[in-house]
Structures are given as structure tokens and as C-alpha cells.
Amino acid sequence: MSYNIVTIDGDGIGPEVCQAAMAVLREACGSDRLNFIPCDGGAQHYQRTGQVLPDDTLQACRSAHAILHGAAGLPGVTYPDGTEVGNDLHLRLRFKLDLFANVRPIRLLRGVQCPLKDWQPGQIDYVIVRENTEGLYASRGGGVRLRDELATDTLVVTRKGVERVARFAFDLSRQRQGAPRDGQRRVTVCDKANILNSYAFFRAVCTEVAQAYADVAIDYAYADAITVHMIKKPDFYDVIVAENMFGDIISDLGAGTVGGLGVASSAELGEHHGLFQGAHGSAPDIAGQDAASPVATMLSAALMLRWLGERHADDALLSDAKRIESAVEDVLAQGHVVPADQGGKARCSEFTEAVLRQLR
């Protein structure tokens, strides 16, 4: 079986890292397994046409097996209300394709120096599942701004939204080996149930869902406290599930504990569609200089293969995903070709070539 993959290069370093990931995918899967379909979108496209997500791009995304994205956003390219245009590309795709689960693996790779003292690869390995279509970000474009005197946004939490992301988190825990500390399969609910009714409801629904998963422990942490726990005891975590905004914040913190956003992969998943991209931004200050790190996008491409392989019972894709992850980690561990964000001087093209050689 071959798969149609929409690619949206986007802005800044997006084209460089997206093309690097595509080269690795071709090497790992062969030239006839993945059919890449380039499509427009992002802040630069908005500057040219007035559209951040063209209709033909959206239609292609609906029809494709998966979407691979580079990065979006440019400084100063904003809507009249001051919000950034680039972010709107992701948000429109999330809502229109109902990508309700944002999956952010937090894993310390070999060859990456951990900012936390004395932690080693294998000791930090958990996943943050961020509810992706509700929460505070559901107010995007719908909040109230009155006479430049008042602005409000509404935090939206529905039973359906919480139930499905909670089930996703518990199912994911069942697929994993448990927390590094004790091997316990565990879902930690991140909220502010002690203060806000919306988060108390989020916690209550997660607790109801947990009753169907006797083999997976449930744990609770307030959003402020978990920022400390993720630093002091990261090996305790297996899967963390959180509302949209809290998930956004703690997933960047988690990435910081394992080397930064440059090595942080991301998958945005729904019942029928999946979008994959590095968790970093478009870094326009280094665009076009061959200075970007493609690690996060390569690892996101591996997540894409894993998702496709599971959906279509394609063991070859699952194997190719493992090969890409191993090749990227092996190159980092060898220490000869190190991206700038990890303290080295390797160019994007140089790191890509090293991964291609490792795959061969």
C-alpha cells in the first residue's frame, strides 16, 4: 500500500526541516511507499494571498492519509486584533479536522545532554496528551474585546471532549511499558480542580473514564505543582493528560528537560486525520542559513509512520519508524554531527546526510 502525505513547508525554517524529514522518509520507506503532495499555507502565503489555509490545501488534507508540516508564523504578520497569523494555520486544521489529541513525547535521547543534573537516557520517558480542540483556545476568534477597555475569552470543557482525550490517554498508557521509576502504567490528570469549576469537571470526567482501566493507575496534579514535579521526579510520569492551554505550557517545559524544542516531536491526532510537526517555531532569524535542526521534524515523521502503521496494520511502516528513531538517536549519540541547538555546529543538510548514511 502507498500513502498520500500532504506536506506544508510553511514559514521560516519550515521548508528546510520539512524537506529534510522527507528525505529521511524516502530513504527509510523507499521511493514508492509515500506520495508527497506539496500544499500552500502559513504566514508568508497569507501575505501573498490573504489566506493562511487555502481551500485546496484543506481539501487535500481531508483526503490525504497524513499531513507533515514544517513550521508556521512570521514576526509582525498578525491579524488586526494582534493575534499571530501563523498560529491560525494549526488552529484551523485542528478544528476543521477535529484533531483532538495533541501528543508530545518527552524522552531523553542518547547524545543529548539533559539540563537536569544526573538524569540519563531511559530515566525520562513519558508522553503529554493535550486536549487540542477545547479549553481556553476554543475562544480563538470568538472572544470579546470591548472599546479597548475589556477583553474576555471563555474556557470551554465538554463531557465529550474530556472523555475522548481521557480514553486516548489511558489507551496510550496501555501501549507503553509504564513509568521509568516503577514500571507502573499511570495517567496523571493535570488541572486546577481546586480553584476552577471547569477543571473540577475535567478531573471528574477523567476519573469516570479511569474506572474502565483497572490496569492503569490514575494520578492527579495541579498545573502549578506539576511544573515542579516534572523537574524533580520526571521518572514518575507515564502519560499526562491536560486541558488545551495547560497542556501547551507543560509540554514546552517537558521538552526543556530533555534538550529543548529542537528535539521535541509532536502529533495532532483525530479519529480520521493526523498532522505531524516539530514542536518548535519557525525561527525566521536563521531561515535560509542551513542552520536549523531537523531532529524534531524527523522524529515527528517517525510518529507519522507509527500512526499510519497502526491504523493500516502495516508492519513495514512500524519497522521504518523504529529505524528512523534509531538512526537519529545514533547520530546524536556518536557526537560527530551535532546540531547548533545541542551545542554543535552541524548544518541542517549535514545532519540530514548523517542520518541518511545511518539508515543505509
Image (spheres, rainbow, N blue to C red):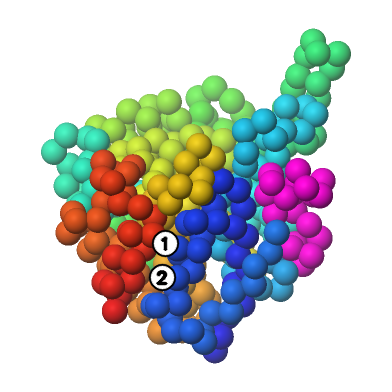
Query: What crowding class fits label 1: few (fewer than 14 Cα within 10 Å), some (14-19), or many (20 or more)?
Result: many
Q: Residues within 10 Å of mark 2 (few under 14, many from 20)?
A: many
Q: Residue at x 50, y 25 (%)?
A: 194
Stretch of the chain drawn in magenta: 41-59
Q: Write down the quadrant of residue 251 in the picture.
A: top left
The residue at the far left in this view is 118
Our reading of the magenta stretch's main secondary structure is helix
Frontmost residue, 345 versus 140: 345
Expressed as whole percent of the image width and height from the top left, the position of residue 259 reads 30, 42
Measure the C-alpha gap from mark 1 to mark 2. Answer: 7 Å
Is 310 left, or right, of 226 in this rendering?
right
Which residue has dot 1 on it? Answer: 298
Q: Which element carries disc 2, helix, strand or loop? A: helix
Residue at horizontal 81 percent and vertical 25 percent from the top:
144
Q: Is residue 74 left or right of residue 261?
A: right
Q: Quadrant of the C terminus?
A: bottom left
Q: Is residue 78 above or below residue 48?
A: above
Position in image of residue 116 (x %, y %): 22, 35
Identify the residue at image location x=52%, y=30%. Answer: 193
Q: Which residue is mark 2?
A: 24
Amino acid bearing label 1: Met
User: Which one is in front, 112 or 307?
Assistant: 112
| Residue type of the residue flagged with mark 2 | Val
Label 1 with label 2: CB-CB less than 8 Å: yes
Q: For residue 42: magenta?
A: yes
Query: Residue 287's spot in the image, x, y percent?
Result: 51, 45
- 69 shown above or below 158: below
